[in-house]
Image: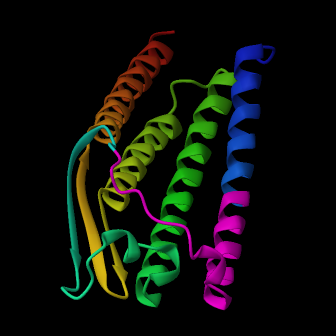
Amino acid sequence: MTKNVLLKMTIAICNILKSLLVFSFLGLTFLFIYIQIDKSPFDKGTFNFETNSGGYSLITKWKDKSVEDYSQIYKLNKIKTTSLYIMYLKMTGILVVLFFCIKEFLKVIKSVKKVETFGLGNVKSFRRIGVLILIYSFLTSYYYIGFEQGGISKLSIPFVPLFLVLLSFVMAEIFKEGVLLKQENDLTI
């Protein structure tokens, strides 16, 4: 299987995605530092909280009673510094989790390319992928952003990542059975 074009393409795509995640982290860090230095370019930018993540969501907004218009509160330049740090750490965590998911998936693809499909390494990789996707769903399920005159929080239960966690653990068990069958087959020969 060393000449399989599909596996080579998958490996190339995974490497490109890993590079994109590294560049995303660098861009996020640059933006985080830039916002700390000068918030004035973000005077016109507002947040859109009406997104659907493929699951159940509960959004809560609040503001000071002295402010009449919500659009004047939820501006990018009015985010509290602590919220900015929390958002940066959370986004960094999400990027790290995605990077390691791709890295584990790449291990599985490379073992398939070497015709070592049913090995304990693949079982462990699928379990790690499941745990990483579970961490991803926890990181993306809640956020809070504090503004100078209000705040917003969102709690959501994302169904797609939870389904992927289940699928990953099922794949780990399938590969575990494949390892056992391979060991039995090796003993009978």
User: Over which residues does the magenta segment extend?
Assistant: 23-51
| Rendered position, 142 above or below 127 | below
Image vertical order of residue 139 relative to residue 128, above or below: below
- The total number of labels drawn is 0
In the displayed structure, does residue 150 sit left or right of residue 148? left
Q: Quadrant of residue 165?
A: top left
| Majority secondary structure of magenta residues | helix
Nearer-the-camera pick, 19 or 172: 19
Query: Can see residue 105?
Result: yes
19 drawn magenta: no
Residue 114 in view: no
Furthest toward the top, the residue is 189
**Residue 39: x %, y % from top left:** 61, 84
The residue sitting at 37% across, 77% down in the picture is: 73
Q: Residue at x 26, y 38 (%)?
A: 159
Image coordinates of residue 168 in percent, x first then y, are: 38, 34
Left or right relative to 86: residue 17: right
Rendering coords of residue 84 (x, y %): 48, 80
Q: Quadrant of the N terminus?
A: top right
Q: Nearer the viewer, residue 144 or 43?
A: 43
